[in-house]
Image: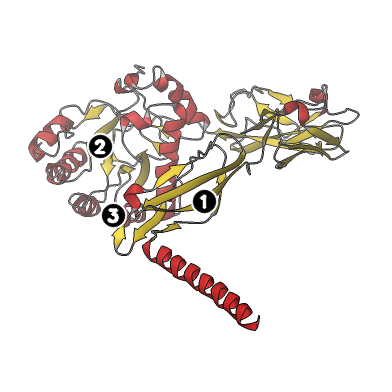
Amino acid sequence: MEFEHKRQIIAILGGILLLLIVYAIYLILSPRIKLKGDAVTEVEVFKKYKEKGVYASYGDTNLGGIVKVSGKVNDKKIGKYKLEYRVNYHGITRKVVRTILVKDKTKPKITLKGDEEVTVCPNTTYQEEGYIAVDNYDGDLTEKVKVTNSDKTIIYSVKDSSGNESVLMRTLNEDTKGPKITLKGYKNMTIYLNQNYNEPGYEVFDNCDNDIKTKVKITGTVNTKKEGIYKITYQATDSLGNVSEVTRTVKVLKKPIENDSKVIYLTFDDGPSRSVTPKLLDVLKEENVKVTFFVINHSKELDYLIKREDSEGHTVGLHSYTHNYKKVYSSVDSYFNDLYAIQDKVYKIINKKPTIIRFPGGASNTISRRYSKGIMTLLDKEVNNKGFTYFDWNISSGDASGGRLSANKIYDNVITNLKYKRNIVLLHDFENNTGIIEGIREIIKYGKSHGYTFEAIDKNTLEYHHKINN
């Protein structure tokens, strides 16, 4: 009996050993397969699922080419999906499974109609302007938006089917903004002594008060019998005490009187230049003659020449920052942007803001028609109202031909046309215009010997304008 029991135990152990041997053989003969990446992968709905694959081998043999995949992932629908990867080698099959969770983690988007900050006038209630809520998966959720009102805010919230929540707030502000005053006419005006000052008037608007015009207070007067700068202040106060104020500046000037003597105003456009300006200034200093330079933007290395022009008593006027007709004359705003740019540059150099200007091409230019019809007619008035005075010329030296004109030709072009009491001569101070250096010396000698005086243009010089052609 005892022997029989032992025999049974040996048989069981033998069976177990046989199973272990069979399993070992199975492991030796079976292929290996392993997932690339995680066994459980999350994918945002509507974003393409990127398959990472598996490693499959038998010993040193790569079995990737015989792996079969079953299952499908719909990345356009929220859900749980499984992919099964199988490899069969030597009649033995091994498999692994990957779980893909397609989820929606994107919050709905709430868009408010109207502004997120709204001014609410006294004794009124904000009237809801509306909103829209859209979810990338659920679509239109506008009807599911929850609106919570308070005195200061309105809160809009909405959840999609996956529990993603969005919250947006509209702020209700008290009226703290003053009325808007818009001046008719020009903010900066210039008139001559004893001319009438006619108040151009104003417009005023307030977002809450309808009768705000009755609450505008105007202070200041213009004495047209005395030179000076006068300020007219327009102040408006709404029913909540919010105040706005604008000021009009009116300059009263003495009208320039034409000099009876014969005067030559030598004016130079387009400088300064490295090769011409220093020598030109030397000649002018030797001859003790003051002139007017209408400058444009150049390298900072030439700024010292503008400073020298000013320190030696010449007038530094403004021509253009870019001298690019397309940019300058594309609109009134573009013109003044260019003008203020060169004015600011000169101000930083000489600590003065010049107001004497010359239009690129002169006021009579027609090239501006290409870019803005009628712009010169507008600028003719605007520059004066913004405190500038402009000067054209009645004699041209003809030296604008790239520096190829000789000193003798420049001299002849000028002296043969000296037939005015006020002779405003157009010359150019650009690079390599070398003929002008000796030409100017001879022009000055001729002028002095024939009873002419030489002056720089200043604020008291009577303006000279061409006929406007655009």
Mark identifier at residue 97: 1
Of badges 3 and 2, nearer the viewer stands 3
Determine the image quadrant of residue 358: top left
Q: Residue at x 47, y 70 (%)?
A: 18
Counting the numbered discs, the total is: 3
Q: Residue at x 13, y 35 (%)?
A: 410
Residue 355 can be seen in this image: no
Determine the image quadrant of residue 440: top left
Q: Amino acid at mark 3?
A: Leu
Q: Between 11 and 120, which is closer to the camera in this rendering?
A: 11
**Quick one: quadrant of the C terminus?**
top left
- Vertical placement of residue 465 versus 357, above or below: above
Residue at numbered disc 3 = 302
Q: The residue tagged with tag 2: helix, strand or loop?
A: loop
Residue 397 can be seen in this image: yes
For label 1, the crowd category at 10 Å Cα-Cα, with few meaning under 14, some 14 to 19 and many 20 or more, is: some
Determine the image quadrant of residue 27: bottom left
Q: The residue tagged with tag 1: helix, strand or loop?
A: strand
Q: Amino acid at mark 1?
A: Val
Mark identifier at residue 452: 2
Of badges 3 and 1, nearer the viewer stands 1
